[in-house]
Structures are given as structure tokens and as C-alpha cells.
Amino acid sequence: MASAAITPRPVRWYNLAAYGSNDVLGAGSMAVISTWILLFYTSFCGLSAAQATIIFGVARVLDAFTSPMIGHLSDNIGRSWLGRRFGRRRFFILAAIPLLPSFAIMWVAGQSFWYYLVTYVLFEMVYAMEIIPYETLASEMSTDYRTKAKFAGARILLGQCSAVGAAFLPGWLISYLGPKSPDTYLYMGIIFSGLFMGAAGLLYAFSWERPRPPGLDEEEAARGGATLGAAFRALYRNLFSTLRIRAFRLHLGMYLGGYISQDIYNAAFTYFVIFALAGSTAIVANLVGVTYVVQLVAVVLAINFALKLSPAAAYRMAAASFAIGVVIFLVMYGAGYGATSALFWLPVVFAGLGRGALNYIPWATYNYMADVDEIVTGRRREGAFAGVMTFVRKMSQALAVILVGQVMQASGFVSKATEQSPQAIAAIVGVMGLGTIAMLAFGVFVSTRFRLTPRTHGILMAEIEHLRAGNRTPSSAENGAIVEDLAGWRYDRLWGNNPVGGAR
């Protein structure tokens, strides 16, 4: 079995900045889409709420199958000429750059249902082509716990900056073009397409991949190679094999609880402000913009809490803050406050603090999942984890948003209407409140069993070297128990002595 040789290379500030800047695509595009796409479809394109969320859901489902295949290909393309010349991860990033303007063509008003479906699916495919390899680079560029935390922090901090722009930019365009102009969204799409291309270019220029040990590419090629057929088979194999890693299962539960709660909140919030609070798109832009500014502050706090306390403890604090913000929104709505009330900045602050930390913590812990997997399989499978994580995320996100749209449609929501019925407004309020809080509660429950901390990660890495040196018993009983808790396997079954990932 080939082992992954670690060749340390210094990580400079510009490497962190270039890595983080790519989340202009990751967080920026998703902030724009989650805040504005459903409103754009129902207000300027003549689509019903059900049609709009079906487009969103279909694109997510297709992407859910594409992402694991891209992850598998990026794991196995290293032995090809393209992989050797451009990097097995970085080749995909380079190839995606000229395709990123596909984001702009999504925002052309007055087209058919099929136009919006095709253009959305196209962008999702390009997005996955760039983001999946990107998600592996922190583990490629460093093995140190704190350095990986810095990569995650740079990513989320700069991603939140782009999300702030995604919220405020439409407001500025609305004030210039008028609230009834669909060109607002087209210009926004063009501006962000340019930013996406620049960020991907910086990422390619200032990143690298860990040198591959001799013979490892040939060993992995024997397991299936970098063909599309092998990638499709790997989709199912990786899905089940990665879920056999206990820390990854728990991480995935926390990730889904934190992110699906935000999916539900985002899908309903714009409608909540406009119809339940009698607000406007400009008010939505301002509220969302301030939320993302607060999230930026929350990321800084979460970085410190996650390093000094534990990711799980920081997660629970973040979920509580987000839930408090949602509850305050519901109480103020019930008390009859409108969108122009100054008191509405209070729940925005609570929600923003929670959301910012919930965005950072799962991605910070994700960077260590390949380390836990390595002690189980003796291999490095960053691409497989990135693909599976995105597969589960996209499938659940699709179901969540489709459910929101179907509930709104069933309640009598009318597209292009300036007012909605009491039943439709009640459905919007209920979805945003109960749906968001239910998913937060699920994430908090899972977090109580997640025990990856800076200390346990250090022990994990020491035990990996212990096994690599040829030992097959733990260096101490305590260390053995910690590793077994993270891996979910007995110590004598670690280091490839198990069926996980085709190790043996």
C-alpha cells in the first residue's frame, strides 16, 4: 500500500487570500441565487412558485450526481498528461474559468421555463467543475490543524464579503434602474461573472498540490481509473464508504442542519419581508446586506471559538443565536411590526451572528475528514469526500427548496401579485419559522456526539505516523480510544485492514 508523503511548503498570506477569494464564486453565487432567484423567476419571468422551485431542485439533483463524479475524476486524473501538466485538482479550475459567464445568462427576463431550466443546470455544472476540486486544496496544501483552520477562515471571510456585495448590489441597482426593471438582475449577473473569473484565476496562480508518492497513481488506477464509467460506479461506492467513517457522518449531520436551516430561511425570507411585513425589494437588500455584514463579524469570532473551545461547542452557540433571531422575527410579526421598524435590526443581528458561524464551522471541520479517513484506509481521498459531501448537500437542498415552493403553491401563492392571501402569508411565516428551527435542532443534537478538537486531531495525526511506521497497536490506551471514536472502527481494523474505500 502506498502512503502519502508529506512535503511541507510554507503557506503565505497571498496563498490564503487567493484560496479565500475563490469563495466569491462559492458563497457569492449562492448568496445571489438563494436571495433573488425565486423572486426573479416569479416576479419577472412569469413562473409559478412551484415551477421556480422545480428548476432549482432539478438543477441541484443533477449536480448532486455530477459532483461526486468530478471528485472521483480529480482523485484519479493525476497519472494523465493533463493531470501532470496542470494538476489533478487545478486542471478543472483552469478549465472552468472561460465557462463562468454562464452565470450571467441565467438572469435574462421574459424567457421560457425551459430556458431557465437549461441555463441554471449549465451554471450548476460549471460551478461543480470548479468548486469540487477547490474544496480539496486546503488538504492538499497543508496537513497542519491551524493552517487548515486559516484556510477555512480565509474562505469564509472573503466569501462573506462577496455575500455582502450580493445583498447590497441589487439594492444599488434597484435605486438606479427602478424596482420594476429586470435589468437589475442581468447587470448583477454580469458583474459577478467577472468576479468569479478573476477569483478562479487567482486560485490557480497561487495554489499547489501535494507531491504524489511514486506508484500511488498506478495503484489508484487499478481500482478504477479516471474514466466516466469508473466515476459513475465510484459515486455509489464512495457514498457508502465515506459514510462508514463516524466523524464524517456526524460532520455531515452538523453541516446539513446548519445549511438546510439557512436554505429554508433564505427561500422564505424575501417573501416574508415583502408580503408578511409589507416591505420592498430594496428593504430586502438592506436587511440581507446587514445580515451578511454581521456574518462577517461572526466568522472572526467563530474562528477563535472553534480553535480555543471545540467545533461542536461553537456550533451549538451559533445555532442558538440563529434560532433566537428567527423567534424574534416571528414575535415581532405577530405583534404587528412592519418591515420599516427599526427594531427589525435586532433579529438581523442575532440571525447574522449565528449564520456566519454556521457557515464557517462545518467547512473548518471538513478539512480534517480526509485525515480521519486516512487512518481507516491508509489512503488520501479528498476528492471523494468533497464529491459525496456535495452530493448529499445538493440532494437535501433540492428537497428543502422544492418543499418550500410546494407549500407556498398549495397555500394559494400567486406569482406577480402585489399582495397575497392570509393563507399564503401564514404558510410563508410557518415555513421560515418552524422549518428553520427544526433543522437547527437536528444539527445541535448531532453536535453533542462530535468530538474532533485541536487536541484529538493532534492525536489522530500522531497515530497515523505511528501506523505508517509499521506499528499495529495504539501508542496508548487513551489515544486508541480517541482514534476509535473518530473513526468508528476498532484499532486493529485501521490502516486498510477493513473494506472501506476498497482498501483491501
Image: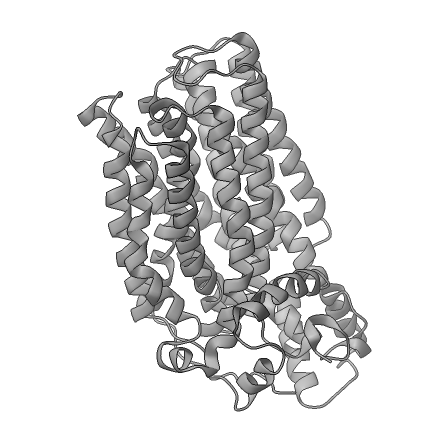
Q: Whole-percent x and y of residue 269? A: 47, 26
Q: Based on the displayed image, in which of its 4 quarters is residue 282 positioned?
A: top left
- Residue 239, position as x, y percentages in the image: 66, 60
Near-viewer residue (325 or 135) = 135
Could one spot residue 54 in this view of the protein?
A: yes
Give the side of residue 52 with respect to residue 293, left or right.
right
Image quarter in which the C terminus is found? bottom right
Quadrant position of the N terminus in the picture: bottom right
The answer to whether residue 294 is seen in the rendering is no
Residue under the point 63% across and 48% down: 254
What residue is drawn where x is 64% and y is 55%? Answer: 251
289 to 386, vertically: above or below? above
Q: Is residue 303 left or right of residue 449?
A: left
Q: Closest to the observer: 393 or 76?
A: 76
Residue 114 placement (x, y as % from top left): 41, 37
Q: Which residue does the image show at 60% across and 43% down from the upper left?
A: 396
Look at the image and name its color scheme. one colour
Q: Is residue 391 above or below residue 273?
A: below
Left or right side of 12 for 302: right
* Residue 493 picture location, percent across and down: 79, 76
Q: Residue at x 34, y 68 (%)?
A: 15
